[in-house]
Image (tube, coloured by chain):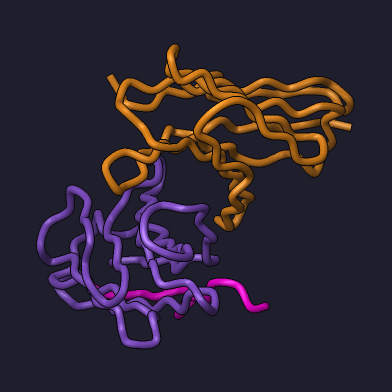
Amino acid sequence: KNEVEQSPQNLTAQEGEFITINCSYSVGISALHWLQQHPGGGIVSLFMLSSGKKKHGRLIATINIQEKHSSLHITASHPRDSAVYICAVDNTDKLIFGTGTRLQVFP
Amino acid sequence: EAGVTQSPTHLIKTRGQQATLRCSPISGHTSVYWYQQALGLGLQFLLWYDEGEERNRGNFPPRFSGRQFPNYSSELNVNALELEDSALYLCASSSDRGLYEQYFGPGTRLTVT
C-alpha cells in the first residue's frame, strides 16, 4: 500500500462543475502540498498546509490531521484547469508523492 | 524575479555514459531538491541540498550523486546510465532550511538509449 493515496486517478468534468480530489496518507507529516503538473511536465505549487483550510481564487485545500486526509476543491471548473494534480506529504525532510489525479475539464 | 532554471532541457545519452544536469534556484533560496519522474511512475525524491551540504537522499543507488555550489546552484550526476534512468528530472528550490513551499523548474528530460 502506498504511503500517499489519491482518488480518483482520473476525473472528467464539464466546465463549471465543482471538483474534489482526495488524498489520504499513512505516515506522520509536518505539512502537505498540492501541486499542479501541466502537459510537458511543468509543476506549480498550489498549496502547502499543515492544518485547516486555505483558499486561492477558485481553489480550496483542506486538511484533517487526525484523519490523515486532505481534499483539493476546484469551484467553477474551467478547461484551463485540466492538468494532473499531485498530493505530496512532508515526511522526515523529504516529500512523498501520490500518483496524481488526471483532470480533464471539457467546455 | 527569475524562477528556477534547469539545463539542458533535453539530454540523450547511451547506456553506461554519465549525465550531468544543472539547476539554478530562485535568488535567495538556499535549498535545492532533485526529483525523478519516470514514465508512468510518480514523482520520487532524489536528493536535498542546503547550504552546500547533502541533507537527505531518497532510495536511489550511489551512482546518483550531486553537489551544491557556493552560489546555491546544483548539479545532479548520474553515472553508469541504465535504460530505466530515462525520466524527467525536476529541480525545486525553497528558502531557508527545511521543506517550505517549493518552486519547481521546468525539468530536464533524460533519454538513455
Residue B9 lies in the magenta stretch: yes
Residue A96 lies in the magenta stretch: no
- The tally of labels here is 0
> Can residue A2 be seen in the rendering of this structure?
yes
Q: The N terminus of chain B lies in which quarter of the figure?
A: bottom right
Q: The C terminus of chain B lies in which quarter of the figure?
A: bottom left
Magenta region: B1-14
Q: Farthest bottom residue? A: B70
Report the residue at 48% width, 74% height from top.
Answer: B25
Tell me the shade of chain A.
orange
Question: Would you say A43 lies left or right of B34 here?
Answer: right
> Can residue A10 be seen in the rendering of this structure?
no
Q: Farthest left residue? A: B62
The quarter holding residue B109 reads bottom left
Question: Would you say B10 lies left or right of A37 here?
Answer: left
Relative to B60, is B70 above or below?
A: below
Image location (x, y in percent) of residue B78: 21, 70
Tell me the shade of chain B.
purple
Report the residue at 30% width, 26% height from top.
Answer: A27
* Camera-side residue of A91 and A23: A91
Report the residue at 41% width, 52% height from top.
Answer: B99
Relative to B74, is B60 above or below?
A: above
Question: Would you say B88 lies left or right of A26 here?
Answer: right
The quarter holding residue A79 reads top right
Image location (x, y in percent) of residue A40: 59, 57
* Camera-side residue of A68 and A76: A68
